[in-house]
């Protein structure tokens, strides 16, 4: 298949440049989310918090999504895609600049407020950008486009822990690292201001998906939205809630898992140039430390996540999207089971592979959920983004299990979440009463 066909509309317009510009937003929130995931362990060390207590960082992050999801949907409908993007970028910038006084205040609540403000801005961007990618070309490639755009998000997830590892951890201890915590957020604040200016002058057409279910006509007649009468949309909200819960739990406690559950490494590896300073000596045995865990997250975990997103965009052009979603989720059920069983290095490998197989879930659930909703897709997008709140609730449960038992046992939580995602994937044709989005095989011309 010709790659350029993914971005051509029915009237022959090529929207690749617009798609490329919007994809930079996915990179932005990937970096911000990646930094959040290494911040948990920093506050555990600085404030002597339990795993469950440190999950307040994730709670504050996803609280921003809950607070801003519906206002973001309203902004998207009132300001259009372009206006919504600019508003989101400005809000992210406010959150980034807040970290300067937060560092002086040096209280947990001040940093949590900054995390929440940035998340509110990211909520606007996600509410606008995710559905927008699905309309930047022919509808049969909607799932491919959103997965391709999310590949940039995967690249951001790689950069985030690397940046966070530099500024959130110090050989002089957590208190020394605390003084430089604001630096990456100040850089983000400046960059997003520049991006807002670029989008202001760029051409960003306001497009909508086809109204397959005639929801716009229904709203004109009875004055009410009927998106909740569409089971494939309601199911997507639930599936996104549990998926983000699983993702946030695995990402948040990855460093804890690596420190507590990974078998010891040899002295040769610990003293090699690659791992120098990334291990700790306990009872005469070398184990991965915080810097080593962050290094593995950025060099193995998130690269696998990126590979999954990139290959997922290709797979969605050949395989029905709902089947791919179901299959990937089932694989992760199996992988989480292996982690729970504590099978040594096999369980460690399963943790890394879970990054690969969870990669396509968020964008694919999103594309399946807003299928055929027309202009109502903007409203639906707000609710699906609100479902990201699952990332605030479930990690606290996973952290509690980790405190009471161990981090391996904590993976029972994402296991059950992936089971629900698999069910949604396989049931989607019945819920939507169509194969429209998933018929991705098209004739070559």
Image: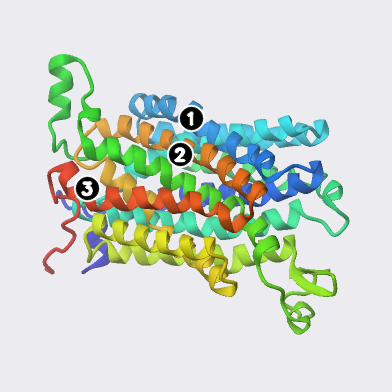
- From this view, report whether residue 273 is shown above or below residue 47: below
Indicate the secondary structure of the residue bearing disc 1: helix
Q: Which residue is mark 2?
A: 388
Crowd rating for badge 3 (residues with CA inside 10 Å; few <14, some 14–19, many 20+)? many
Crowd rating for badge 1 (residues with CA inside 10 Å; few <14, some 14–19, many 20+)? many
Residue 143 on image: x %, y %? 28, 53
Residue 195 on image: x %, y %? 52, 43
Left of 32 or right of it: where is 172?
right
- From this view, report whether residue 115 is shown above or below residue 8: above
The mark nearer the N terminus, 2 or 1, is 1
Residue 137 seen: yes
- From this view, report whether residue 413 is shown above or below residue 193: below
Indicate the secondary structure of the residue bearing disc 2: helix
The mark nearer the N terminus, 1 or 3, is 1
**Observer-nearest of 414 and 225:** 414
Task: Verify CB contact (< 8 Å) between mark 2 and mark 1.
Answer: yes
Crowd rating for badge 2 (residues with CA inside 10 Å; few <14, some 14–19, many 20+)? many
Measured Cα–Cα span from mark 1 to mark 3: 25 Å
Q: Which residue is mark 1?
A: 66
Q: Residue at x 41, y 40 (%)?
A: 241
Residue 380 lies in quadrant = top left
Q: Residue at x 35, y 39 (%)?
A: 238
Residue 145 on image: x %, y %? 31, 55
Quadrant of the image for the C terminus?
A: bottom left
Residue 207 seen: no
Q: Residue at x 25, y 30 (%)?
A: 376
Indicate the secondary structure of the residue bearing disc 3: helix
Q: Which residue is mark 3?
A: 428
């Amino acid at each position: 298949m010709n790659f350029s066909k993914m971005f051509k509309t029915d009237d022959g317009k090529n929207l690749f440049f617009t798609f490329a510009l919007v994809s930079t937003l996915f990179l932005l929130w990937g970096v911000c989310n990646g930094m959040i995931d290494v911040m948990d362990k920093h506050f555990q060390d600085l404030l002597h918090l339990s795993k469950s207590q440190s999950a307040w960082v994730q709670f504050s992050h996803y609280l921003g999504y809950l607070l801003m999801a519906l206002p973001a949907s309203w902004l998207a409908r009132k300001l259009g895609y372009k206006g919504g993007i600019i508003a989101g970028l400005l809000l992210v910038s406010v959150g980034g600049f807040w970290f300067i006084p937060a560092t002086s205040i040096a209280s947990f609540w001040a940093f949590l407020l900054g995390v929440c403000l940035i998340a509110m801005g990211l909520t606007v961007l996600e509410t606008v950008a995710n559905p927008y990618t699905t309309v930047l070309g022919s509808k049969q490639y909607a799932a491919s486009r959103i997965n391709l755009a999310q590949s940039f998000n995967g690249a951001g997830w790689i950069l985030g822990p690397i940046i966070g590892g530099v500024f959130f951890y110090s050989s002089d201890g957590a208190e020394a690292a605390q003084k430089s915590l604001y630096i990456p957020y100040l850089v983000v604040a400046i960059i997003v201001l520049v991006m807002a200016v670029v989008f202001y002058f760029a051409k960003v057409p306001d497009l909508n998906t086809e109204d397959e279910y005639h929801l716009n006509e229904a709203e004109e007649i009875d004055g009410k939205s009927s998106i909740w009468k569409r089971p494939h949309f309601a199911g997507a909200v639930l599936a996104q809630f549990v998926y983000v819960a699983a993702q946030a739990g695995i990402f948040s406690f990855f460093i804890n898992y690596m420190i507590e559950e990974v078998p010891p490494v040899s002295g040769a590896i610990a003293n090699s140039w690659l791992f120098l300073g990334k291990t700790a000596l306990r009872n005469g045995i070398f184990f991965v430390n915080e810097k080593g865990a962050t290094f593995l997250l950025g060099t193995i975990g998130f690269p696998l996540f990126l590979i999954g997103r990139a290959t997922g965009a290709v797979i969605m052009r050949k395989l029905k999207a709902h089947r791919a979603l179901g299959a990937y989720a089932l694989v992760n059920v199996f992988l989480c089971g292996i982690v729970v069983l504590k099978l040594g290095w096999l369980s460690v490998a399963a943790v890394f592979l879970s990054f690969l197989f969870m990669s396509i879930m968020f964008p694919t659930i999103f594309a399946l959920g807003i299928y055929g909703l027309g202009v109502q897709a903007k409203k639906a997008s707000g609710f699906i983004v609100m479902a990201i709140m699952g990332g605030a609730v479930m990690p606290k449960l996973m952290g509690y299990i980790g405190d009471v038992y161990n981090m391996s046992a904590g993976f029972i939580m994402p296991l059950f979440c992936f089971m629900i995602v698999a069910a949604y994937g396989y049931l989607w044709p019945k819920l939507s009463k169509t194969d429209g989005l998933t018929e991705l095989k098209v004739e070559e011309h």
